[in-house]
């Protein structure tokens, strides 16, 4: 067979000589190299690490070909690189919904007070979280009622727009008995005005007229609604504009059928001519807010009376609000269990001169703020709860030992200034999270022992995805808590096979004096080695010309097992050793582990 070579250059001999030179000038070298940031950029690895060893094996050879263009077969490079090995564990966060509470027998958005959440949360997580791995965590958020809870239909019990015609005058007369006096009857009566107050979004607004009270008058009036309210919470609201304020007294309140007062709303001068609003419960001693409000400005006052507890709260609004604020303007506690059937308006010398309009009484905040047909609401005090669960490979279990979920007070111990975790009770990308947590653990567990381990879960705020829960594992070593590293520094060895760089696990090893001695010790007494001097082997640290190839191979296999007793199948060694034969000669022998034994790797 004839093989033809085709050259396309103008000087064919140039190509032949270049090919010969490339073969004759191949360099065999060994090197160690650690990838740099520029290398990762060249490989388009924006995170500065490989996501798997297979990716590193696939991508690094091209980089080595550029770095070592003249190195050839027999060359090796030990490459250091960053490898992402994954987080210590996964974290889910789950907030219960109505269907979850239903499994516990609660038809409300929360566990009933006598329920044990841990009896249900494991199964709830199993239903709602799929794909969890062994060791993963789930932070569960839920609500539980602290006492009796029930549903209620938002209902307006009473509404007053003072729509009593076009003639101003005594409120008891113009209302035709809707409003009646219960104190100082006929003496400087409260007045009906044909103008009204308004506030955008408030349903009882800018309708009919209004009631006008004065600090120079004395008559107190009330109106009765159809049926008394004997349970739950009663809300009462009114628009008000005060044009003068005195030393302080109540002017608007709830009443029972026996003229017992509740939720007495009052006002007084703040010392600068502005208004402080306050509330009393069943007594006339009021608790005033510390916020000053303006004269001749329309505000929406909302008071409430909790019949079961006797607590009265007051809110002062500049616009309607869909939900009840978490903090009232003022609060007071008095007698409980007073049924409510009347609204009272009072005049006194210490009270304000003002216009009131748009009075409403309802059983919910939402009914005060809307005339729409509203969905039923759950009534009852409930608190937010949080439990940490761990996945054991098949079920979710309440996590106790070996884990810790940071609480608000824990973040506070790490500093509450801007840029510190306690400022917002979370970490963010600007903080050295592991340093903070390691220090925290050192304080919390002062008697930790080496190899103690704890998984810590914490709140993290991301500008892209908002608040989330994350975590990491920490191990106590040499007096400090060390964080688990999701990205590690590791190495891969590559060898040149004559064509390209390939992953290569070859270990190049040069025998030491101790190695020769070890081999001699292992072969002492073996009759197969009577033809060689084992004493000379250990004394001179070399083999001599009497050693056969088979004896040398067996010696190297003994050494390989000694150096690497757990070597995996396919592990390679290149041993460099000395042999005396009319002088010292440096030789190599290549071995590979095949079927559990070391054999020549030619």
Image (tube, rainbow, N blue to C red):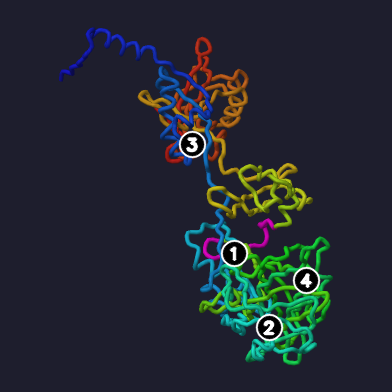
Q: Is residue 448 visible?
A: yes
Q: CA distance from mark 4 to mark 1?
A: 45 Å
Q: CA distance from mark 2 to mark 4?
A: 25 Å
Q: Is residue 275 above or below residue 164?
A: above
Check disc 1 and report the residue beneath it. Answer: 140
Residue at 66% in and 57% down? 403
Residue 185: quadrant of the picture: bottom right
Q: Residue 280: x and y, percent?
A: 79, 76
Query: Is 395 contained in the magenta span?
Result: yes
The N terminus sits in image quarter: top left
Check disc 3 and report the residue beneath it. Answer: 46
Q: Is residue 235 visible?
A: no
Element class at badge 1: strand
Check disc 2 and report the residue beneath it. Answer: 169
Q: Are marks 4 and 3 in contact (CB under 8 Å)?
A: no
Q: Tag 3: Cα neighbours inside 10 Å, few (<14), some, or many (≥20)?
A: few
């Amino acid at each position: 067979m004839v093989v033809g070579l085709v050259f396309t250059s103008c000087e064919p001999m140039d190509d032949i000589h270049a090919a010969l030179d490339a073969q004759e000038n191949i360099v065999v070298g060994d090197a160690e190299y650690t990838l740099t940031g520029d290398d990762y950029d060249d490989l388009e690895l924006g995170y500065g690490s490989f996501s798997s060893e297979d990716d590193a094996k696939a991508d690094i050879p091209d980089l080595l070909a550029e770095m070592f263009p003249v190195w050839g077969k027999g060359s090796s490079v030990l490459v250091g690189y960053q490898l992402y090995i994954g987080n210590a564990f996964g974290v889910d966060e789950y907030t219960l919904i109505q269907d979850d509470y239903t499994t516990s027998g609660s038809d409300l958005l929360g566990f009933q007070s006598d329920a044990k959440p841990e009896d249900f949360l494991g199964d709830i997580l199993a239903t709602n979280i799929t794909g969890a791995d062994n060791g993963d965590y789930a932070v569960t958020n839920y609500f539980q009622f602290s006492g009796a809870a029930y549903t209620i239909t938002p209902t307006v019990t009473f509404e007053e727009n003072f729509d009593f015609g076009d003639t101003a005058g005594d409120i008891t007369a113009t209302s035709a008995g809707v409003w009646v006096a219960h104190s100082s009857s006929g003496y400087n009566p409260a007045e009906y005005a044909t103008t009204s107050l308004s506030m955008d979004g408030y349903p009882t607004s800018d309708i009919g007229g209004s009631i006008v009270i004065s600090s120079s008058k004395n008559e107190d009036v009330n109106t009765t609604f159809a049926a008394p309210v004997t349970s739950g919470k009663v809300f009462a609201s009114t628009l008000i504009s005060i044009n003068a304020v005195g030393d302080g007294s109540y002017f608007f309140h709830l009443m029972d059928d026996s003229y017992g007062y509740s939720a007495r709303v009052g006002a007084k001068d703040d010392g600068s001519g502005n208004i402080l609003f306050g509330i009393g419960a069943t007594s006339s001693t009021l608790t005033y807010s510390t916020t000053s409000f303006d004269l001749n400005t329309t505000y929406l006052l909302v008071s409430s009376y909790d019949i079961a507890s006797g607590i009265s709260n007051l809110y002062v609004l500049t616009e309607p609000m869909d939900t009840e604020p978490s903090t009232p303007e003022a609060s007071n506690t008095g007698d409980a269990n007073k049924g409510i059937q009347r609204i009272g308006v009072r005049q006194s010398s210490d009270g304000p001169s003002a216009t009131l309009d748009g009075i409403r009484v309802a059983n919910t905040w939402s009914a005060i703020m809307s005339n729409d047909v509203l969905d039923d609401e759950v009534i009852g005090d409930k608190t937010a709860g949080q439990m940490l669960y761990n996945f054991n490979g098949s079920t979710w279990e309440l996590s106790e030992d070996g884990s810790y979920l940071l609480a608000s007070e824990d973040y506070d111990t790490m500093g509450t200034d801007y840029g510190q975790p306690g400022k917002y009770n979370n970490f963010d990308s600007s903080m050295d999270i592991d340093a903070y947590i390691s220090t925290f653990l050192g304080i919390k567990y002062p008697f930790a022992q080496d190899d103690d381990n704890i998984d810590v879960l914490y709140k993290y705020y991301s500008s892209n995805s908002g608040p989330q829960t994350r975590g990491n594992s920490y191990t106590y070593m040499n007096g400090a808590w060390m964080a688990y590293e999701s990205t590690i520094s590791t190495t891969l060895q590559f060898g040149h096979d004559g064509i390209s760089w390939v992953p290569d696990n070859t270990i190049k090893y040069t025998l030491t004096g101790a190695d020769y001695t070890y081999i001699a010790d292992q072969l002492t007494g073996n009759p197969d080695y009577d033809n060689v001097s084992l004493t000379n082997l250990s004394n001179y640290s070399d083999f001599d010309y009497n050693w056969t190839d088979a004896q040398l191979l067996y010696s190297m296999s003994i050494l390989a097992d000694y150096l690497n007793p757990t070597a995996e199948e396919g592990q390679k060694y290149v041993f460099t050793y000395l042999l005396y034969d009319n002088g010292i000669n440096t030789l190599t022998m290549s071995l590979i582990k095949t079927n559990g034994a070391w054999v020549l790797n030619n």
